[in-house]
Image: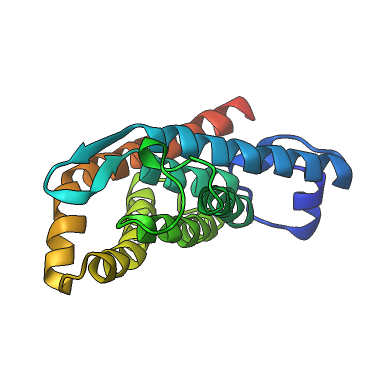
Amino acid sequence: MSAPAARIGRVPVLADLIPADSRQRALVRDVLLTLAGTAFITVAGYIAIPLWFTPVPISLATFAVLLTGAALGPLRGASSAGLYLALGVVGVPLFANGSAGWAFASFGYILGYVAAALLVGILARRRSDRNVWKTLGLAALGSLTIYAFGVPWLAAFVGVDFATALTLGVVPFLIGDAIKIIAMSALLPATWRIVHRTRG
């Protein structure tokens, strides 16, 4: 854990294990990690598959958001997702399939990225990313948070009722989400086990 984190007694997330022995270096580290998180979400978002029966594409961005929130913690994780959102809204083509702006059916999910990264980061600070079962819960709550923003936006934008929005914006993605959640529940606890072994 870095010296600033140790002084305030925070439970570390994975990013806190990157050493920073002064406040200035910790700030530089945090800025670089936030930018890296935004880049990770962007690259993952470009890995998208459009579906003919719904305006919401299959994307790896949700996985990247949840992993970024858990690894970076609430402030850096939410900042990464927030920067991704802000740059896309002003016209930088960061969103799936190189899109930008806000007037499209899946924009609500991107709004949910910020809230999900914040929530997952908070849970990671409570050690919920260190065993399989807690990580399953962490990732599931993060996914539900994204849906909580995405589905109402989808319903309003497309002009359909809530049940139809669930059919278009949730049901086609449940299997993929389950795979992402299982992957996180394997990856994060395994990383912490390696950290603990390395540090004796």
Residue 195, picture quadrant: top right
Vertical side of 114 occupied by 131: above or below = above
Residue 59, picture quadrant: top left
* Residue in the image at 50% along x and 58% along y: 114
Q: Nearer the viewer, residue 145 or 20?
A: 145
Q: Position of residue 50 (x, y in %)?
A: 23, 39
Q: Position of residue 7 (x, y in %)?
A: 81, 55
Q: Position of residue 86 (x, y in %)?
A: 57, 54
Q: Position of residue 168 (x, y in %)?
A: 16, 57
* Residue in the image at 46% along x and 32% along y: 43
Residue 161 in view of the camera: yes
Q: Give the quarter of the figure containing the C terminus.
A: top right
Q: Nearer the viewer, residue 103 or 179?
A: 103
Vertical side of 198 occupied by 137: above or below = below
Q: Is residue 77 left or right of residue 33?
A: left
Q: Give the quarter of the figure containing the N terminus.
A: top right
Q: Is residue 146 left or right of residue 15?
A: left
Residue 1 in view of the camera: no
Vertical side of 169 occupied by 61: above or below = above
* Residue in the image at 48% along x and 40% along y: 94
